[in-house]
Amino acid sequence: MPTLYFDLGSPYAYLACERAALLGPELEWEPVLLGAIFKLRGFGSWSATPARVGRIAELEARARRYGLPALRAPAGWPSDGLEAMRCATWAKAEGRVEPFARAAFRAQFVRGESLAGAGVLEACAGEADLEGERMLREVEGPAVKQALRQGTQAAWEAGVRGVPSVRVGDSIFFGDDQLELASAALGEVPTGPR
C-alpha cells in the first residue's frame, strides 16, 4: 500500500492531494509535521526566502496545468500549523483523514482561509463528517500529540525529507510532480507471496 505524507501548510502537498487518485484507492494518508522535518534536515522553507515569488508563480502554473482552481494562500501564509496537523492526526485516528485533509487544503489554498483559526478547522471537520468541537478538545490531549510526533519520526526514518512524499515499498518519491513515477512504481512492487 502506498503512503502519502503531507503537511496542511504545504501548497505542493495540496497539489498532490488533489491528484492522489493517481495512487489508487488503497492510499494511506499520513500527516507529518513539516517544521519538525525542517529541524531534522537542518534547513527550512523556501517561503521565507527570495525564492518565494518564483515558487508561488510555479505553484500557480502547476495548479492551472492540473486543472485545479486558482491558488489563493491566506494573508500571512505560512502560519503556525501545529493545531491543524494535530487535527489531521486526530482525523486519521477517526478514519476520516482524507476528507479532512481535502477540506483543509481547499479552505487554505482555494478559499484563502487561515487554518490558524479554530472556526476554519471546525468547518473542515464538519465537511469531513467529524464533530469539530470534539476534535478541538481531543487534539489537546497527549495521545494526539504523541501520534503526530511518532508519525513524523517514522516518516523521517523512512526517508521523508519534505512534503509531499509518497512511499512505495522502500522508495520515496518527493514532490507533487513525482506522483506519476510513484504510480508507475506501484505496478512494480510485489504485493505478497506468489
Image (cartoon, rainbow, N blue to C red):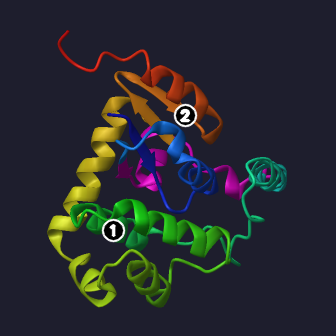
Let me know if residue 164 appears in the view.
Answer: no
Q: Residue at x 40, y 60 (%)?
A: 98
The span shown in magenta is: 29-51
Q: Is 18 in the magenta?
A: no
Which label number is shown at residue 60?
none
- Vertical position of residue 56 compared to residue 181: above or below: below
Q: Quadrant of residue 175?
A: top right
Circle 1 sits on which residue?
86
Q: Is residue 142 left or right of residue 91?
A: left
Q: Amino acid at mark 1?
A: Arg
Q: Amino acid at mark 2?
A: Phe
The tag earlier along the polypeptide, 1 or 2, is 1
Q: Secondary structure at mark 2?
A: strand
- Vertical position of residue 41 compared to residue 186: above or below: below
Circle 2 sits on which residue?
174
Q: Nearer the viewer, residue 171 or 140?
A: 171
Q: Secondary structure at mark 1?
A: helix
Residue 111 location, x and y as percent? 67, 78
Residue 141 location, x and y as percent? 18, 75
Q: Residue at x 45, y 85 (%)?
A: 123
Q: Nearer the viewer, residue 147 or 131?
A: 131
Label 2 near label 1: C-beta < 8 Å? no
Residue 180 location, x and y as percent? 60, 30
In which quadrant will I find the N terminus?
top left
Could you tell me how far apart the alpha carbons at marks 1 and 2 are, in whole angstroms?
A: 23 Å
Residue 47 location, x and y as percent? 69, 56
